[in-house]
Image (tube, rainbow, N blue to C red):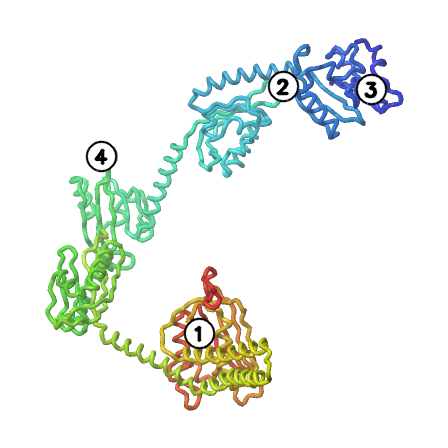
């Protein structure tokens, strides 16, 4: 369209269109058109007139002029730009009569839309043709056994075959645009990137071995050839990479290197002398021990280093070379620290089927020779010791299946023991036999060295004693068990003594409970008197109400309820006091700690009204304990604290509880006289007492109860003055059921 017609393309008077940069639109290389808010064409620059037939389009709407825009990307984007007032760029195809692809940039301007567009049909179709050629090339390259990749400077893929995709573990779409660092092993990125940058400057090809890493972390070794191609001077060179997977080769090479390094390390770290000599008697290899102890270096001749022994060495070597068999010799040899005894094993050194010399391992057995002599002496001492002990010493030959017993065994069994395993197993108590026999058989298969078991064993008179049997397993050089040596000790007297101690301890526990009854007698009278007196008063008042004529039934019922409650409380006091002194084993269960603390303090301090008591126990804290035994421990500790403060100006007891890991720690502190130094070491021992006339079993029983609960008890000085007695009990699990009082 002629330039003289431009002035008629737009009316710029009195409208926002007058602000359009017309000069800029005419100067741009893009096609430009302007739509007003009613979607009418109000402007075309010269290039848009050349691209579109704009005759009679001014003032008309885009939807009627170009009906195929309706419902297309054009309409969708234009309406979105008009609504959101945000620029958008897109590429779309318009059918006949244009039959062309356009790259479009829509810009909101006041209440108009300025559209910049250019025809990209040639580029689009060229790209499609190029893509078709690339696909054809991919088809050809897919049959290649090497990975081939061609990418541009911006990492945009031009060509990549399936083999390279398989090597990298990614699809073409995933690789397109990815930089080299995305699929190169992190340790190889710095040096490979430096090589790539260096060769890219000169556009010279190069060859490297590097590692790629797949998305799943698998490492792939490749032999990589990189070259560059430049299509024109104005463009950066593209990169062509040809990769051949060599993972197996590199792993084999790495294993070989590791084996060589390991072998060298083993040879050099060996305590034995290791060396190789050729047929001429010249050292080919010596290990670190050989070099440091005798100074023998590879290349030296045995005659130069050991002139006095060379003849004997030569004769031994010739025997091995001529026979092709191993030779073991034991000989005394001068060493820097004196004459030593060595055991040397020499074998032929063969290479390509030809004997080239000898390989030798020489071990210093001087200490072993001395040890064997000492062992013979020790065995004689052991034999004499076995005659003196009362234990039954036995040796089980596992290969022959026989058992040898010491002469002292008859005193334990009451008869001469038999030599078979059946004799021993027949005398084990029937209830213990299967467990003991199967246990020792499992032990032989376990690889352990020491076995021990306690069981009942029948004597010759038919009675059963309790024995402790233990044994030590002996293996040969191959690690196979060959024999087992052990001893049986009769521990029946010790077990019976322990049982007597346990019975005595149980009696002491009962004595401790009963000994508390003297103090509890007054407590019982005091505690019961209050509810019974209250109940009597309620009943007396009820009598007066009934004698007054027409009684108030509500008041009568209330009095009856109050009297009943007081009588019930008196019964509960008696019941708890009886539980505190009765026999019974510990039955642990979740216990809310505040209750036994409160009850123990009430009982222990009933006659100590001048003692200030502070209790810092969380109301919801629970422990796993026998409530009666827990209350007994607390009662003893609180009573002891009260006794320790007699005659003191300040009398205060503090009871605290806190969670420590899986346990709860309770602390009873007082302001009394403290703990005498001479009592600190035996405070919790039986019959140790600081009270005149005391039995000295209270704290000992406290320790017994606490340890039976899996806790511990201790004492320490209080800050300032007094003492602190603390003990731990297990905390109740978080998922344990509520205490019975709250279980409903």
Mark 2 or 3, closer to the camera: 3
Q: Dot 1, how many residues are within 10 Å of its Cα: few (below 14), some (14-19), or many (20+)?
A: many
Q: Dot 4, how many residues are within 10 Å of its Cα: few (below 14), some (14-19), or many (20+)?
A: few
Using the numbered discs, state the Cα–Cα distance from disc 4 to disc 3 in whole angstroms.
96 Å
Q: Is residue 58 depicted above or below 443 in this figure?
A: above
Q: Which residue is mark 2?
A: 233
Using the numbered discs, state the Cα–Cα distance from disc 2 to disc 4 in whole angstroms.
65 Å
Q: Dot 3, how many residues are within 10 Å of its Cα: few (below 14), some (14-19), or many (20+)?
A: few
Is residue 716 visible to us here?
no
Q: x, y percentage for residue 597? A: 50, 75
Of mark 2 and mark 1, the one earlier in the sequence is 2
Looking at the rendered structure, the secondary structure element under dot 2 is: loop
Q: Which mark is residue 630?
A: 1
Mark 1 or 4, closer to the camera: 1
Task: Name the quadrant containing residue 285.
Answer: top left
Q: Which residue is mark 3?
A: 23
Nearer-the-camera pick, 290 or 515: 515
């Amino acid at each position: 369209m002629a330039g003289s017609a431009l002035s008629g393309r737009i009316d710029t008077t009195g409208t926002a269109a007058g602000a359009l940069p017309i000069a800029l639109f005419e100067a741009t290389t893009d096609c430009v058109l302007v739509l007003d808010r009613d979607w009418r064409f109000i402007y075309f620059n010269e290039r848009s007139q050349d691209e579109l037939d704009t005759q009679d389009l001014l003032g008309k709407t885009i939807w009627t002029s170009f009906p195929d825009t309706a419902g297309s990307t054009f309409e969708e984007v234009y309406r979105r730009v008009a609504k959101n007032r945000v620029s958008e760029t897109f590429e779309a195809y318009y059918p006949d009569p244009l039959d062309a692809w356009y790259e479009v940039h829509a810009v909101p301007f006041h209440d108009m839309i300025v559209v910049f567009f250019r025809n990209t049909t040639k580029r689009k179709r060229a790209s499609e043709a190029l893509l078709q050629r690339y696909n054809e090339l991919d088809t050809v390259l897919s049959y290649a056994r090497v990975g081939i990749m061609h990418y541009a400077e911006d990492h945009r893929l031009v060509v990549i075959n399936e083999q390279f995709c398989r090597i990298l573990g990614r699809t073409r779409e995933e690789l397109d645009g990815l930089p080299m660092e995305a699929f190169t092993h992190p340790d190889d990125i710095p040096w490979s990137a430096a090589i790539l940058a260096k060769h890219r400057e000169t556009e010279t090809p190069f060859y490297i071995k590097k590692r790629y890493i797949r998305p799943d972390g698998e490492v792939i070794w490749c032999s990589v050839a990189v070259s560059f191609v430049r299509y024109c001077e104005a463009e950066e060179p593209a990169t062509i990479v040809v990769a051949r997977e060599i993972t197996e080769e590199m792993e084999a090479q790495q294993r070989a290197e590791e084996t060589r390094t390991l072998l060298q390390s083993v040879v050099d770290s060996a305590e034995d002398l290791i060396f190789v000599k050729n047929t001429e008697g010249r050292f080919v290899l010596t290990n670190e021990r050989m070099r440091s102890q005798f100074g023998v270096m590879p290349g030296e001749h045995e005659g130069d280093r050991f002139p006095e022994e060379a003849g004997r060495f030569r004769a031994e070597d010739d025997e091995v070379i001529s026979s092709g068999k191993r030779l073991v010799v034991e000989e005394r040899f001068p060493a820097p620290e004196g004459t030593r005894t060595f055991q040397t094993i020499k074998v032929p050194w063969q290479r390509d089927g030809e004997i080239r010399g000898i390989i030798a391992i020489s071990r210093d057995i001087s200490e072993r020779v001395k040890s064997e002599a000492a062992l013979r002496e020790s065995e004689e001492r052991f034999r004499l010791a076995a005659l003196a002990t009362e234990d039954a010493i036995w040796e089980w030959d596992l290969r022959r299946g026989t058992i040898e017993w010491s002469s002292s065994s008859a005193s334990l069994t009451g008869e001469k023991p038999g030599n078979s395993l059946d004799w021993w197993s027949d005398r084990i108590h029937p209830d213990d036999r299967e467990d003991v026999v199967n246990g020792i058989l499992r032990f032989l298969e376990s690889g352990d060295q020491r076995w021990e078991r306690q069981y009942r064993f029948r004597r010759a008179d038919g009675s059963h004693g309790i024995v402790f049997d233990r044994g030590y397993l002996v293996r040969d050089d191959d690690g196979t068990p060959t024999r087992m040596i052990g001893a049986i000790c009769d521990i029946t007297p010790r077990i019976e003594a322990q049982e007597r101690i346990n019975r005595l301890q149980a009696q002491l526990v009962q004595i401790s409970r009963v000994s508390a009854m003297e103090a509890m007698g007054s407590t019982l009278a005091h505690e019961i008197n209050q509810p019974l007196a209250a109940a009597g008063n309620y009943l007396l008042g009820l009598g007066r109400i009934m004698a007054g004529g027409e009684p108030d039934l509500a008041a009568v019922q209330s009095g009856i309820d109050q009297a009943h409650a007081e009588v019930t409380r008196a019964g509960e006091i008696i019941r708890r006091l009886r539980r505190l002194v009765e026999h019974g084993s510990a039955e642990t269960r979740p216990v809310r700690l505040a209750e036994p603390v409160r009850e123990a303090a009430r009982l222990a301090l009933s006659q100590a009204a001048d003692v200030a008591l502070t209790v810092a126990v969380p109301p919801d804290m629970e422990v796993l304990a026998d409530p009666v035994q827990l209350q007994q421990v607390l009662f003893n500790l609180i009573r002891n604290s009260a006794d320790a403060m007699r005659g003191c100006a300040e009398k205060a007891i503090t009871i605290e509880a806190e969670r420590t890991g899986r346990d709860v720690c309770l602390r009873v502190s007082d302001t009394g006289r403290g703990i005498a130094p001479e009592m600190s070491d035996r405070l919790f021992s039986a019959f140790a007492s600081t009270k005149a006339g005391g039995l000295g079993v209270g704290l000992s029983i406290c320790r017994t109860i606490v340890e039976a609960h899996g806790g511990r008890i201790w004492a320490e000085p209080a800050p300032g003055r007094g003492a602190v007695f603390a003990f731990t009990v297990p905390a109740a699990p978080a998922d344990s059921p509520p205490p019975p009082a709250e279980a409903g």
